[in-house]
Image: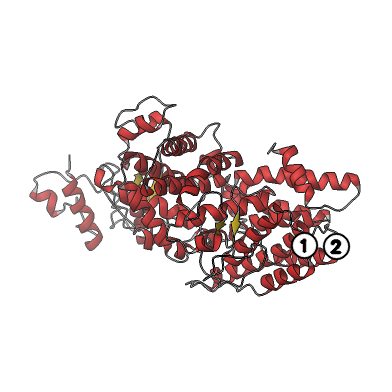
């Protein structure tokens, strides 16, 4: 039988020469090897003097001369791609920690990752890492613009370069985790360039912190890679999400039980909790994220510089070197605004150079950077505005006309997004999202603070401007994924059935597309409840309807 080398020789000479002879062609490699060349067969064609030099199936993968060179290159690329498919779960050195962190599961062996029920995550290192589409979801892919799933800013290549590594080497575990986290950030972040350094440092700090941290960061990277695929949440039970919740809650409980934990221990526990909350927001019911929000609250308060029992300076947190502090505070404020529930802590806006501040008076601030701004496009000025509004509601303060005018001026003077972007398309979308937040802030101010119904002129005007923006864009992951919070906040102002259906479909389309934003689907039940109740009673919606429907539907 011809060896691989001789078969390759036949293919090479056939390609270069086109033919070897007129009768019984023999290549030089076969002659030198003293074997009979079986790689060429004759066939009757229009030109009987030419040979059909088709390679037999058992020989080396080499296409016929008659086929186009493009076809040969395509086949080679597909073969190489299959060889470069990497299973991320096989790379994480998590053997010992799985036994210590996951009580509901039996202690697995060092090689049996499947013992905890974690599906394999296949990463093609030759493809863009920010791709979030399932191969089977071809029907819904047509509704989303092509550039949405591309790495438009090269974020993945900056966080983690494309790698072709030995997947059996334990030393390659960190690069594979970086790849998974890069895909997660590319899908998650409103401004991935701003998140790049934070994400990279987060992975480095936790990966080198021991088995428990490595286990959690490995789960985050695995789930982050799968966010956007039907495989993640269509099953009856997703063991990765359950394992993440168990591991993070176990770590929080262990830290809360310590008498005097160190700052580094507190920071890493809070870090893991806020990252897991974001994952659950995308892929789990809302109660999963809220459970972590409540259980990690004591750790957050211990890290705040203010004495216990005093309001937390939210402006100081925005500039605090510990990112997990302002990350948690912003999530606490945003969730309380969307769900119309009190914040877990009382916040105040401190004035630089002063020990005292009026928590109800607007303070002019610069439009800086913040995690929520980078993730969801919420300007920092609105975070401060919402925190003051929640404080007013907590203190049962009725705003006067002067305070409302100052709030309106602050919203009107909110600076637009000016962050760098290598793609004009992304810059336009970011400006669009921030303008939607401006109109949403007006509606929230008038309805939640002033007590207006959806039928008042100023509410209708702000809602009209918002709908003009929405109707001017095509539905798709970008920008809809970053408009979810604005839509949830502005829905009480929707009166016409046509407008309500547009808003609801923009939210549900994201879930039906790739089964993410599971928490959002539960909130849509709340929205439909207060719409229906107001229609039955023949009156416009008021902001108090939101809390009534939340308790009726979600029980919280």
Cα distance between the residues tagged 1 and 2: 9 Å
Residue at the extreme right: 538
Look at 62% across and 70% down and name the residue there: 363
Judge from the rendering whether residue 11 lies leftward or rightward of residue 311; answer left or right.
Answer: left
| Mark 2 surroundings within 10 Å by alpha-carbon count, few (fewer than 14), some (14 through 19), many (20 or more) | few
Residue position marked by numbered label 2 in the rendering:
456
Image height check: is 147 above or below 523? Answer: below
Of callouts 1 and 2, which one flags the residue occurring earlier in the amino acid sequence? 1
Question: Left or right: 532 with respect to 82?
Answer: right
Crowding at dot 1, Cα within 10 Å, few <14 / some 14-19 / many 20+, comes out as many
The residue closer to the viewer here, 444 or 147, is 444
Left or right, 419 with respect to 357, comes to left
Q: How is the image coloured?
A: secondary structure
Query: x, y (%) of residue 457?
Result: 85, 66
Q: Is residue 44 visible?
A: no
Where does the N terminus fall, quadrant-wise?
top left
Mark number displayed over residue 446:
1
Q: Quadrant of the C terminus?
A: top right
Closest to the observer, 450 or 469: 450
Judge by depth and name the residue closer to the eye, 91 or 437: 437
Q: Nearer the viewer, mark 1 or mark 2?
A: 1
Count of numbered tags: 2
Picture coordinates of residue 409 (x, y %)?
70, 73
Task: In the displayed orientation, state which residue is furthest to the top.
Answer: 106
Callout 1: SS: helix
Percent position (x, y) of residue 253? 45, 35
Say if 383 sits above or below 249 in the image: below
Given contact means CB atoms under 8 Å apart, are the residues at marks 1 and 2 in contact?
A: yes
Query: Residue 246: horizontal and vertical position, in percent?
Result: 46, 34
Image quarter for residue 21? bottom left
Left/right placement of residue 540 relative to residue 323 reads: right
What is the secondary structure assignment of the residue under circle 2?
A: loop
């Amino acid at each position: 039988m011809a060896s691989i080398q001789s078969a390759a020789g036949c293919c090479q000479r056939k390609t270069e020469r086109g033919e070897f002879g007129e009768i019984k062609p023999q290549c030089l490699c076969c002659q030198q090897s003293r074997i009979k060349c079986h790689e060429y067969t004759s066939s009757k064609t229009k030109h009987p003097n030419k040979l059909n030099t088709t390679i037999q199936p058992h020989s080396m993968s080499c296409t016929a001369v008659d086929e186009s060179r493009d076809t040969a290159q395509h086949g080679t690329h597909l073969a190489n791609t299959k060889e470069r498919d990497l299973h991320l779960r096989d790379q994480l050195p998590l053997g010992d920690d799985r036994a210590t962190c996951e009580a509901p599961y039996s202690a697995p062996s060092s090689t049996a990752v499947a013992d905890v029920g974690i599906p394999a995550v296949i990463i093609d290192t030759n493809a863009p890492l920010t791709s979030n589409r399932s191969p089977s979801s071809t029907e819904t892919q047509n509704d989303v613009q092509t550039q949405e799933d591309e790495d438009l800013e090269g974020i993945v290549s900056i966080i983690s370069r494309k790698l072709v590594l030995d997947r059996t080497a334990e030393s390659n575990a960190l690069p594979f985790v970086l790849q998974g986290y890069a895909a997660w950030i590319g899908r998650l972040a409103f401004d991935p360039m701003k998140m790049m350094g934070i994400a990279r440092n987060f992975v480095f700090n936790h990966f080198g912190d021991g088995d428990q941290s490595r286990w959690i960061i490995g789960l985050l990277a695995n789930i982050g890679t799968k966010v956007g695929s039907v495989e993640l949440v269509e099953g009856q039970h997703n063991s990765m999400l359950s394992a993440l919740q168990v591991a993070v809650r176990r770590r929080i409980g262990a830290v809360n039980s310590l008498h005097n934990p160190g700052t580094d221990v507190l920071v890493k526990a809070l870090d893991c909790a806020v990252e897991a909350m974001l994952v659950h927001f995308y892929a789990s019911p809302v109660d999963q994220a809220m459970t972590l929000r409540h259980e990690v609250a004591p750790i957050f308060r211990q890290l705040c510089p203010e004495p216990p029992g005093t309001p937390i300076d939210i402006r100081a947190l925005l500039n605090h070197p510990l990112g997990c502090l302002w990350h948690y505070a912003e999530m606490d404020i945003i969730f309380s605004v969307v769900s119309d529930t009190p914040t877990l802590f009382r916040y105040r806006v401190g004035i630089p150079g002063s020990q005292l501040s009026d928590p109800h008076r607007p303070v002019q601030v610069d439009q800086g950077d913040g995690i929520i701004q980078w993730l969801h496009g919420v300007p920092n000025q609105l975070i401060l505005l919402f925190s003051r509004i929640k404080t007013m509601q907590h203190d049962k303060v009725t705003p006067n006309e002067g305070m409302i005018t100052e709030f309106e001026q602050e919203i009107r003077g909110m600076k637009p997004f000016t962050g760098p972007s290598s793609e004009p398309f992304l810059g336009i979308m970011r400006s669009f999202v921030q303008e939607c937040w401006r109109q949403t802030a007006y509606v929230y101010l008038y309805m939640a603070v002033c007590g207006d119904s959806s039928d008042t002129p100023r509410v209708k005007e702000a809602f009209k401007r918002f709908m003009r923006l929405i109707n001017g864009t095509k539905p798709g992951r970008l920008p809809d994924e970053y408009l979810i919070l604005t839509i949830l906040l502005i829905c009480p102002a929707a009166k016409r059935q046509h407008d309500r259906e547009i808003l609801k479909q923009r939210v549900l389309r994201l879930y039906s597309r790739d089964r993410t934003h599971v928490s959002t689907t539960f909130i849509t039940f709340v929205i439909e409840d207060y719409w229906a109740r107001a229609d039955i009673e023949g009156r416009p919606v008021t902001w108090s309807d939101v809390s009534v429907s939340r308790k009726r539907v979600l029980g919280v």
